Image: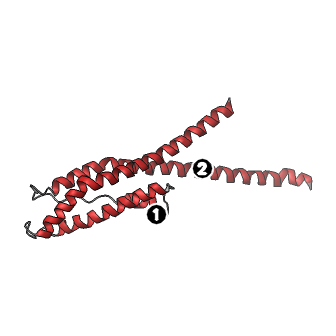
Amino acid sequence: MPEFLDRFLLPIATGTVFGFIINWLLEVFRRKYRRKRILNSLSAYLQAMPRYNLYNQTATNPTAPPKHIVPMLYPIAPFENAVFSENNIAVSGSSIQATINYLIKATELNALIQSLQTSRFVSEQDETIRLTRQFIFDQADKDMPQIISILESEIKKEQKWWAGLRILAEDFRRRKSA
């Protein structure tokens, strides 16, 4: 019986345990890599946000509104997917709140932008159109840059936290091998 345990059961049990551990470690590394890619993608979107604001300011300029330009919709889906989907990334409470603030403001502005896009045949002298353009202009000039700045700092904190964790792991490996 001990020979059976040593020759058959012990290698099977050892292989199963090592297989489980290796699979678990691979999954941890996959999640870490995926999270890093998502954070980099969100950071790239946030780098483009000043252009969105500038474009929307130009399109809704109350002093000389261009006739051929309509405002551009703010991106929402990448931020919703990154934080609120089933396959989301783990983020801090302050990052979630910054994302919620961005999504609320972007959704509000997108609704107004869509109303402008569908009202092409309404007179530009219409008071509702004028007030909508003025509101989008003001939001793209004041509120949206602040909200984006806060969200950008939160994304950078998330990236730095993972970078700090990586540095600690590398330092631990160097000490262990020395």
Q: Earlier in the sequence, mark 2 or mark 1?
A: 2
Q: Regarding mark 2 in the picture, which secondary structure is present there? A: helix
State the residue position of label 2: 26
Residue type of the residue flagged with mark 1? Ser
Image x and y of residue 128, in percent:
15, 69
Q: Residue at x 31, y 64 (%)?
A: 107
Q: Which quarter of the figure is the C terminus placed in?
A: top right
CB of mark 2 within 8 Å of CB of mark 1?
no
Q: Horizontal placement of 24 versus 86: left or right? A: right
Q: Quadrant of residue 16?
A: bottom right
Q: Horizontal placement of 19 versus 66: left or right? A: right
Q: Horizontal placement of 19 versus 132: left or right? A: right
Residue 154: assigned label: none
The mark lying in front, picked from 2 and 1, is 1
Q: Regarding mark 1 in the picture, which secondary structure is present there? A: loop
Residue type of the residue flagged with mark 2? Leu
**CA–CA distance in space, label 2 to label 1:** 22 Å
Q: Residues within 10 Å of mark 1 (few under 14, many from 20)?
A: few
Q: Which residue is drawn at 35% across and 58% down?
A: 102
> Between residues 3 and 66, which one lies in front from this camera angle?
66
In the picture shown, does residue 111 fall above or below 74?
below
Image x and y of residue 99, in percent:
40, 58
> Between residues 148 and 9, which one lies in front from this camera angle?
148
Q: Horizontal placement of 165 versus 38: left or right? A: right
Image x and y of residue 60, in percent:
16, 58
> Between residues 143 and 114, which one lies in front from this camera angle?
143
> Between residues 174 and 5, which one lies in front from this camera angle?
174
Q: Residue at x 48, y 59 (%)?
A: 88
Q: Residue at x 49, y 57 (%)?
A: 93
